[in-house]
Amino acid sequence: LINYHQQGYLILREAFTPERIQTLLVAVHRLIDRALSGNPELRWIDRANRLPARTGHLLHPEKYDPAFANWLNDDLAPQIEALLSDYPVRHSLFGMLASGAGQPYCQKWHRDIGKPGAPDEAGFLKRYHGKFVQVNAPLLPGDRFLHIVPASHLRDSTPEEIQASEDGDQADMPGALVVELEPGDIVYYNANLWHRGWNPNGINRWTLHCAFWQAKYPVMKHEHGQREAFLTPDYLDQLPPMSRKYIQRYLDQYPEGEPKSLLELS
């Protein structure tokens, strides 16, 4: 935990068994089979070769597979609880980053909800560190697609970092680190680190990508819109205990009316 708080990320090697990874891969293939039969609808990189594009909402009823909820319930939950200071946790996002077929995918450098260059930037970053966490867990080998700037999550952005973010997706960033993962590994990170997704050669990638917040925070704009699906009759009853708690707390914190961004809540 010390490394996570100081550096803004934590890599756990061989955190999950080969059997768990295989179960998750089979679940993705089941989802693809269903999508090819017409339900649910997925976006595709290459439909003929069974390559979906980035896919969100894997816990929603149409895309749900017990393997996803069991992974969250059995493996992720204890780690997430520790990272969020054993505070009650709620669901935010649960999907899969996907690329491949030689199609480049390149993001520019960014902070997810930070305020680069703002007078109160460092104070804002410190206020929300430890209140939320983001997760990448690859299902395919050779995951080298998350680039970060370690220990950039609690300080003001430098002029060089701001310039790199403005220079587009080909810009070099001082102090950047490539996060290297294999199936069974996981990285937990503060999404206000300077980071980017970087796959210029379009290498095949399936990486589970999730986010969680302390349950005291209301559901915000970037995670809004999931309530109707989660209220599908009998949906919650099929979830294992911790996964159900995370979804229920999301529902409990769902705002009436227009949701706010974290910047508007601050």
Image: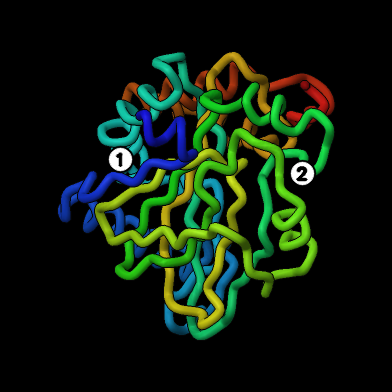
Q: Is residue 240 above or below residue 155?
A: above
Q: Which is more toward the observer, 116 or 54?
A: 116
Q: Is residue 228 above or below residue 164?
A: above
How crowded pointer 1 is (Cα within 10 Å; few <14, some 14-19, many 20+) is rated as some
Q: Residue at x 44, y 42 (%)?
A: 9
Residue 78 visible, this angle: yes
Q: Is residue 143 above or below residue 154?
A: below
Lateral position of residue 128 relative to residue 47, left or right: right
Where residue 44 appears, as percent x and y from the top left, is: 56, 72
| Alpha carbon separation for disc pair 1 and 2 | 35 Å
**For the residue marked with disc 1, what is the amino acid?**
Trp
Q: Earlier in the sequence, mark 1 or mark 2?
A: 1
**Residue assigned mark 2:** 116
Image-quadrant location for residue 236? top left
- Secondary element under disc 1, as helix, strand or loop, is helix
**For the residue marked with disc 2, what is the amino acid?**
Pro
- Secondary element under disc 2, as helix, strand or loop, is loop
Lateral position of residue 209 relative to residue 18, left or right: right
Q: Residue at x 47, y 65 (%)?
A: 145
Q: Residue at x 38, y 35 (%)?
A: 3
Q: Residue at x 29, y 61 (%)?
A: 182
Lateral position of residue 259 relative to residue 217, left or right: right
**Residue assigned mark 1:** 71
